[in-house]
Image (cartoon, helix red, strand yellow):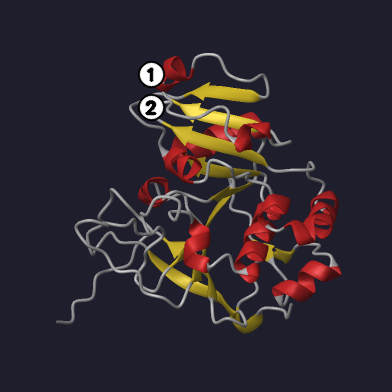
């Protein structure tokens, strides 16, 4: 499989010790800055050209439908998980992918060995932790993710904890204040509980909105598939951000850090999220 074609790149942060196989496949180095006082938070999504993240069709709602299970997209997904201390996942994403596991090698088994080598070189445990976020506690504790060999945290409310009831011994349930866990409290809890310094969120879109609203998202990795999904009354279809609408003067802008392209014309964007930008005064 050819490496990703790097069209544009701004190197930020000290390069990670990528094994040669990962360095070649990614098409160059990968590094992260280290914000002072809190962990670095980054996201990873795949969308259509019109911003759709799910086709909202039974058994065809997962992200692999958007990317057509692209090898390159699965590789980048695995690489980013390998770089993270913890992967944050919303309850809706878990329900859409009940057989999923949020580990690097589940995303891309062919690179399991170099992913493991990277984590050893960074002084990290064998697998990143996974944190499931649910206000209601409506989680299937028999899902495949709860059988994975990795630390598992559930961040929920008092009501959600009551609904969960008894849970597997390998699952740490953290009760948080309020009607739903805020992104700021999620980041603080993971930094305190797990010592997380690098947090990856994979959604869903409602959780993505919370991270943007609370201004704790530092970078976005976004794979754009060259297709248009469209929407209708019957298929509303989720976009990258849901349950949140910014005003023009508050909308976060981003600075482009990297653009890569795969052989099948998927684009891989990396952006640094800016808190806000002034709305243009031009009409």
User: Tags 1 and 2 in contact by the CB under 8 Å rule?
Assistant: yes
Count of residue discs: 2
Assign the N terminus to one quadrant of the image. Answer: bottom right
> Can residue 45 be seen at all in this image of the molecule?
no
Q: Secondary structure at mark 2?
A: loop
At horizontal 26% and vertical 56% (from top left) the residue drawn is: 236
Quick one: label 1, few (<14), some, or many (20+) residues within 10 Å?
some
- The label shown at residue 159 is 1
In the rendered image, residue 225, in percent from the top left (x then y), is placed at 48, 73
At horizontal 52% and vertical 51% (from top left) the residue drawn is: 202
In the figure, residue 254 lies in which quadrant? bottom left
**Towards the viewer: 96 or 84:** 96
> Can residue 102 be seen at all in this image of the molecule?
yes
At horizontal 58% and vertical 18% (from top left) the residue drawn is: 167
Assign the C terminus to one quadrant of the image. Answer: bottom left
At horizontal 84% and vertical 56% (from top left) the residue drawn is: 113
Relative to residue 106, is residue 142 drawn left or right? left
In the figure, residue 8 lies in which quadrant? bottom right
Residue 100 in the image: above or below residue 232: above
In the rendered image, residue 50, in percent from the top left (x then y), is placed at 34, 71
In the rendered image, residue 84, in percent from the top left (x then y), is placed at 66, 50
Q: Secondary structure at mark 1?
A: helix
Residue 51 in the image: above or below residue 97: below
Which residue is the extreme one toward the front?
59
In the rendered image, residue 89, in percent from the top left (x then y), is placed at 52, 43
| Disc on the earlier residue, 1 or 2 | 2
**Towards the viewer: 156 or 68:** 68
Relative to residue 232, is residue 124 drawn left or right? right
Q: Which residue is mark 2?
A: 136
Distance between the alpha carbons at the discs numbered 1 and 2? 7 Å
């Amino acid at each position: 499989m050819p490496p990703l074609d790097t069209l544009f790149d701004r190197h930020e942060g000290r390069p990670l010790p990528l094994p040669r196989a990962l360095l070649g496949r990614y098409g160059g180095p990968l590094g992260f800055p280290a914000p002072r006082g809190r962990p670095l938070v980054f996201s990873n999504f795949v969308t259509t050209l019109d911003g759709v993240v799910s086709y909202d069709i039974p058994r065809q709602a997962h992200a692999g439908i958007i990317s057509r299970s692209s090898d390159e997209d699965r590789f980048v997904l695995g690489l980013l998980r390998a770089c993270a201390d913890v992967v944050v996942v919303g309850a809706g994403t878990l329900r859409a992918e009940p057989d999923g596991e949020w580990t690097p090698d589940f995303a891309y088994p062919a690179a399991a060995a170099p992913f493991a080598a990277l984590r050893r070189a960074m002084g990290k445990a064998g697998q990143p932790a996974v944190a499931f976020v649910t206000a209601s506690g409506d989680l299937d504790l028999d899902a495949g993710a709860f059988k994975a060999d990795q630390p598992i945290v559930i961040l929920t409310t008092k009501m959600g904890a009551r609904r969960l009831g008894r849970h597997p011994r390998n699952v740490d349930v953290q009760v948080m204040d309020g009607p739903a866990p805020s992104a700021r409290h999620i980041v603080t809890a993971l930094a305190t509980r797990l010592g997380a310094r690098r947090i990856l969120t994979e959604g869903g879109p409602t959780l993505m909105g919370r991270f943007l609203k609370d201004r704790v998202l530092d970078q976005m990795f976004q794979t754009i598939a060259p297709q248009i999904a469209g929407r209708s009354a019957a298929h509303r279809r989720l976009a990258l951000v849901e349950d949140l609408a910014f005003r023009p003067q508050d909308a976060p802008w981003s600075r482009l850090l990297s653009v890569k392209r795969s052989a099948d014309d998927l684009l891989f964007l990396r952006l640094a999220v800016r808190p806000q930008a002034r709305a243009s005064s031009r009409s």
